[in-house]
Image: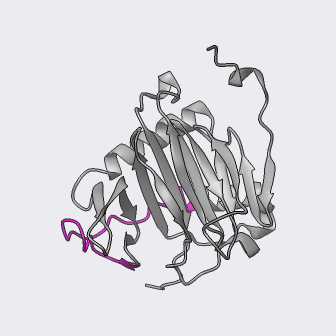
């Protein structure tokens, strides 16, 4: 079957109140630079790890944090469920990228947030993310989500239940998704990765998802 997806334009869309998808937001050069940084940040100490759930299971997505370390279900300044090392600081370039993303989604007047968390998830071809809410922060600032590598099905739902109604959209390399306001606590997940769809020039097998958040936790 011939892939014809590149023949059709992908337009900005509102997926819900306060939830915006901006396709191709990062150009190829920005994607390569961000990937290079992520590869450096993912190295030990406090690097990429498998995440254990409270029930003893393992998440299929591997993860590391910058600024704060997330573990089910809270934040710490050290990799408490990893090697115990201090978490790497939040890079100023990512904090600036978060403000730029919010301005692109909602206008410059909304770009004053101080993003101090980056959670970076790596999906191989079989990885999934179940429906969940991002509710471990003490801030209602919008969540900024950036995609690199393989495309995925991103499922964006409602604030009340993990089940329908929800909307499935395709996130491709370079796409931006921002959700805040009344959609800030919407359930969302990734039920499928489209393996082998990453841009060849990026040099990435799999998908990286960079999510930027405001912790509200202070110093």
What main secondary structure does the magenta stretch of the protein show?
Answer: loop
Which picture quadrant has residue 36?
top left
Look at 69% across and 63% down and name the residue there. Answer: 164
What colour scheme governs how the chains and residues are painted in the rendered image of this protein?
one colour
Q: Relative to the observer, which residue lies in front, 186 or 208?
A: 186
Residue 180 pos. (x, y %): 70, 69
Q: Is residue 162 left or right of residue 7?
A: left
Q: Relative to the observer, which residue lies in front, 192 or 34?
A: 192
Residue 100 visible in rendering: no
Look at 49% across and 22% down and name the residue there. Answer: 200
Q: Relative to the observer, which residue lies in front, 158 or 64?
A: 158
Up-down relation of residue 200 to residue 147 (above or below)? above
Up-down relation of residue 78 to residue 125 (above or below)? below
Q: Tell whether position 80 is magenta.
A: yes
Q: Is residue 184 left or right of residue 54?
A: right
Look at 42% across and 53% down and name the residue there. Answer: 121
Residue stretch in magenta: 74-96
Residue 3 visible in rendering: yes
Which picture quadrant has residue 219?
bottom left
- Considering every residue shown, the one lying at the far front of the view is 163
Residue 132 pos. (x, y %): 54, 68
Q: Is residue 145 left or right of residue 202?
A: right
């Amino acid at each position: 079957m011939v892939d014809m997806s590149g023949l059709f334009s992908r337009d900005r869309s509102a997926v819900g109140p306060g939830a915006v998808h901006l396709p191709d937001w990062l150009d190829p050069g920005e994607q390569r630079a961000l990937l290079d940084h992520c590869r450096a940040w993912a190295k030990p100490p406090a690097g990429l790890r498998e995440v254990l759930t409270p029930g003893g299971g393992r998440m299929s997505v591997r993860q590391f944090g910058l600024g704060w370390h997330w573990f089910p279900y809270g934040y710490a300044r050290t990799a408490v469920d990893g090697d115990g090392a201090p978490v790497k600081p939040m890079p100023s370039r990512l904090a600036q990228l978060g403000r730029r993303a919010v301005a692109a989604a909602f206008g410059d007047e909304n770009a004053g947030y101080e993003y101090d968390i980056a959670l970076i998830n790596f999906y191989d071809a079989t990885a999934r993310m179940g429906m969940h809410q991002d509710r471990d922060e003490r801030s209602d600032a919008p969540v900024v989500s950036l995609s690199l590598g393989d495309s995925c099905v991103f499922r964006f739902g409602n604030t009340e239940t993990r089940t329908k109604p929800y909307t499935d959209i395709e996130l491709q390399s370079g796409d931006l998704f921002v959700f805040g306001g009344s959609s800030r606590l919407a359930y969302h997940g990734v039920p499928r990765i489209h393996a082998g769809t990453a841009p060849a020039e990026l040099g990435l097998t799999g998908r990286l998802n960079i999510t930027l958040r405001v912790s509200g936790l202070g110093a």
